Amino acid sequence: MSFEKFNFDQKIVAGIEACGYKTPTPIQAQAIPEVINGRDIMGLAQTGTGKTAAFVLPILQKLIQGPRRRVRAVIVAPTRELAEQIHDNISELGRQTGLRSVAVYGGVSKFGQLKMFKSGVEIVVACPGRLLDHLDSRDLDLSGVEMLVLDEADMMFDMGFMPAIKRLLKYLPQKRQNLLFSATMPNEIRHLADSILKDPARFQINHSRPTALVSHKLYRVEKAGKPALLKQVIQDKTVSTALVFTRTKHVAKKLALNLEKDGHRAVALQGNMSQNKRKEAMDGFRGGRFNIMVATDIAARGIDVSGISHVINYDVPATVEAYTHRIGRTGRADRTGEAFTFATSEDRLIVRQIEQTIGARMIVQDQVVNGQTEVRSRPSMPVADGDRAGRPAGKGGAKTAGISSAKKGRNGGGGGHSPRNGGPGKATNKPRRQRSAPLGVDFFTQPRRSGAKTGGDRA
Ligand code: AMP
């Protein structure tokens, strides 16, 4: 299947070519015709599936005709980074269309945003808080909006944006097309969908199941041993670009500073940083100035950086969905990647739930000693149903709008000494075992309940 069958305007075709997209991803193949036909959409898809272009392309196609210099489409996203990313995608795909978009979020002066409103934009990509701010002060008129996109709706719910979304709806005309995208489907999102979507076309891509191209490894460690363990694992030659997740902003900041002191090219991304600092960090990570980013879930949600070889869960995520989102950062666009999870004895329940969701047991690692990783004998089970079909087929080296090529060295480091999924066995030179902190109970001794519930929408 090619993009030709959508009969996009030639100016949009030029944008698709500039991005290096050759074939539509499954979510694009399904959603684009429906959106062009004017239907509402409920898309269950996580980042990495090409969902942004699935709504950006038909929006451009619809807006290319009709009035200019007034807001006709609003895209609401939970984080500034995601809003910027969508805005960049619009700029690149729509470069030749003359359609203009603005990214609107807090933490920066309103001046630039007001100037853009005055000059006339057709698309507003916004975080809910600042958008409402503008609407309440009557700086922005959304009465001509034809299309509304709510992206990463579950994340917006998690971040407490639901009341803001409901209030925002009052500023929009009743008659409009609604597109709702969410990585997961908790009840609250189901209710939201029921209340705003009219007879939606529904798509589910890749629900809650991270890519089969990612291998999942587990390091058992107690809290006090995590800093030393992190230093050990990032010495590994295969770790070319790593995104390290911590539970708190404070730890993200401290870890990044410590890594930097140790001579690593590390940077933090967390909510206490100013917008400028966050942008600097993101640009530096994308451009390869930094190869380790230490981030909180919220700050890193939805970010698209190509070539991340490793996701390191310094702290185990609070929910299975958060694991899925984190892991979505590596193994993207048909590349391979590795996910390392540092788990304490308190994390055993969530680790089990994650394993049930990914359809595999994580490969238990012992600590790395002198560059050697010992793999314990518990084998991983093969991933039951890989989701390769749900992912973009690569971009031929092209970059997403506004995203300069991140370091594209070894991805996933498939080689080396650590066997991938299904790879029981040990490194040939049996390394000395070393634990940086005493382990609690071995939390894999109890039998697993087969077919146990995976934690539903929310773990
Ligand atoms: P998203 O899920 O929207 O965050 O997209 C993930 C990545 O896939 C981004 O880098 C996009 O530029 C890329 N992408 C989107 N659509 C395609 C496509 N049809 N072919 C190749 N790459 C794509």
Image: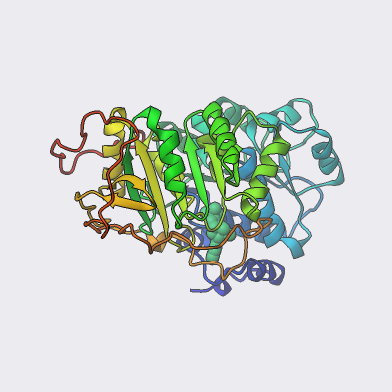
Task: Give the residue displayed 64% in from the left and 71% down from the top.
Answer: 17
Q: Quadrant of ligand 1?
A: bottom right
In depth, the one of 435 and 451 nearer the eye is: 435
Q: Quadrant of residue 167?
A: top right
Q: Nearer the viewer, residue 200 or 27?
A: 27
Say whether residue 325 is visible: no
Q: Residue at 50% across / 36% down in the picture?
A: 297
How far across and how far down the image is residue 256, in percent? 57, 37
How many numbered badges does the structure rendering display? Answer: 0
Question: Where does residue 98 sit, x and y in percent of width and height?
Answer: 79, 60
Percent across and percent down for residue 269 are: 60, 38
Q: In what quadrant of the picture does the C terminus appear?
A: top left
At 40% from the left and 39% from the top, the residue drawn is 229
Return the residue nearer the eye: 266 or 343. 266
* Residue in view at x 57 percent, y 74 percent: 4
Scheme by which the image is coloured? rainbow
Where's residue 152, x and y in %?
52, 42
Query: Which quarter of the picture shows residue 124?
Result: top right
Q: Could you tell me if residue 14 is visible in this image? A: yes
Q: Is 77 displayed left or right of 135 in the figure?
A: left
Position of residue 287 in the picture relative to residue 215 (left or right): right
Q: Nearer the viewer, residue 169 or 252?
A: 252
